[in-house]
Image: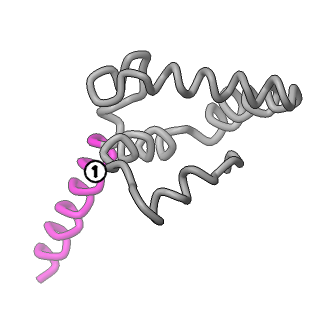
């Protein structure tokens, strides 16, 4: 019976390790969305520039988030979320209103 517990633990451990490896397998990089959304990087750049123009203090906050918080805490969860977001279809009707009216960065 004890051997079965050890095997079950080992299998669970390997499964968790596999999940973490898969999540790390798709890091964000320049041109990541080139095939699925070729204008994504330009849209993000333009939107960020517009917000920084209106609220210059946002630039420092974004830099801090990227270079401090991500390096200290790790951005693996953020990167995995962005990969998943690339697989979300375009929302239409009332469901699309959330995206259209979302003006704050969480």
The quarter holding residue 15 reads: bottom left
Q: Residue at x 54, y 52 (%)?
A: 99
User: What colouring style does the render use?
Assistant: one colour
- Give how far across and how far down residue 9 sits, in percent: 23, 67
60, above or below 82, in the image: above
Question: Foreground residue, 7 or 103?
Answer: 103
Question: Foreground residue, 43 or 20?
Answer: 43
Which quadrant, please, contains the N terminus?
A: bottom left
Question: Foreground residue, 94 or 56?
Answer: 94
The quarter holding residue 34 reads: top left
| Residue at which label 1 appears | 19
Q: Classify residue 32 as left or right of residue 65.
A: left
Q: Residue at x 32, y 49 (%)?
A: 89
The secondary element bearing badge 1 is classed as helix
| Residue extent of the magenta highlight | 1-22
Question: Foreground residue, 75 or 85?
Answer: 85
- Give how far across and how far down residue 37 sits, in percent: 35, 29
91, above or below 36, in the image: below
The quarter holding residue 68 reads: top right
87, above or below 49, in the image: below
Q: Residue at x 30, y 45 (%)?
A: 87
Q: Residue furthest top?
A: 30
- Give how far across and how far down residue 39 sits, in percent: 42, 22
Q: Classify residue 89 as left or right of residue 79.
A: left
- Give how far across and how far down residue 54 sits, in percent: 84, 29
Judge the density around disc 1: few (<14), some (14-19), many (≥20) Cα neighbours within 10 Å: few
Magenta segment, prevailing SS (helix, strand or loop): helix
Query: Residue 57 magenta-drawn?
Result: no
């Amino acid at each position: 019976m004890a051997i079965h517990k050890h095997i079950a633990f080992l299998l669970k451990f390997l499964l968790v390790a596999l999940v973490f490896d898969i999540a790390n397998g798709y890091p964000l990089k320049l041109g990541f969305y080139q095939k699925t959304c070729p204008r994504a990087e330009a849209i993000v750049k333009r939107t960020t520039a517009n917000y920084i123009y209106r609220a210059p203090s946002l630039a420092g906050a974004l830099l801090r988030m990227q270079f401090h918080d991500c390096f200290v805490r790790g951005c693996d969860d953020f990167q995995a979320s962005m990969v998943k977001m690339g697989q979300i279809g375009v929302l239409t009707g009332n469901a699309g209103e959330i995206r259209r009216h979302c003006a704050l960065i969480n």
